[in-house]
Image (tube, rainbow, N blue to C red):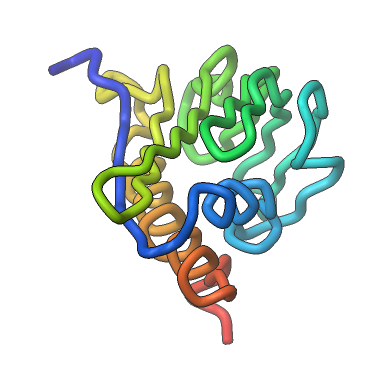
Amino acid sequence: MKNQNFTTAFSVDKTPKEAFDAINNVRGWWSGNIEGSTDKLGAVFTYSYEDLHRSRQKITEFVPGKKVVWHVLDSSLNFVKDKTEWNGTDIIFEINRKDDKTEVRFTHVGLVPAFECFDSCSNAWGGYINGSLRNLITKDKGRPNPKEK
């Protein structure tokens, strides 16, 4: 259990293409400032939120309607001692059709309980994935800043 990666999943009454398109509309569901393209293989984008979090991701897999993988090239998490905990981790979105629904499974490979940021990062991911991204897929409106109106 100590090395278990953070993962979460949900199912929606939308197509795999609709889920895939929403995942790649990162600005629509993830808070903060995003610079660069988030919707093509090989693209590199930077995410930053206030002075708490900055990370640079490269899209290493991009299979329409099926899977997206971001490899974290570098990061700075200013709320933990080891600010580089995300470096070298992979953020994976897998999309599968199950019965008459589309399942979206999110895994942050390398975000494990041994990391100082595990609790706060997994709580944040849970909110973004199960709340904001799910809303973007089902209602065409994400909630990237739930505390802001």
Residue 6, given in percent of the width and then of the height, sits at 31, 31
Q: Quadrant of residue 37?
A: top right
Residue visible at 24% across and 48% down?
99
Of the pair 23 and 118, the residue shown nearer to us: 23
Of the pair 88 and 130, the residue shown nearer to us: 130
User: Is residue 92 positioned above or below 9 on the image?
Assistant: above
Residue visible at 50% across and 76% down?
139
Of the pair 132 and 66, the residue shown nearer to us: 66
Quadrant of the image for the C terminus?
bottom right
Task: Describe residue 59's horizontal placement relative to residue 44 as left or right.
Answer: left
Q: Quadrant of residue 27?
A: bottom right
Residue visible at 56% across and 40% down?
65
Residue 142, given in percent of the width and then of the height, sits at 55, 70
Q: Quadrant of residue 1?
A: top left
Of the pair 87 and 95, the residue shown nearer to us: 95
User: Is residue 148 positioned above or below 14 on the image?
Assistant: below
Residue 78, given in percent of the width and then of the height, sits at 58, 37
Residue 73, given in percent of the width and then of the height, sits at 69, 18
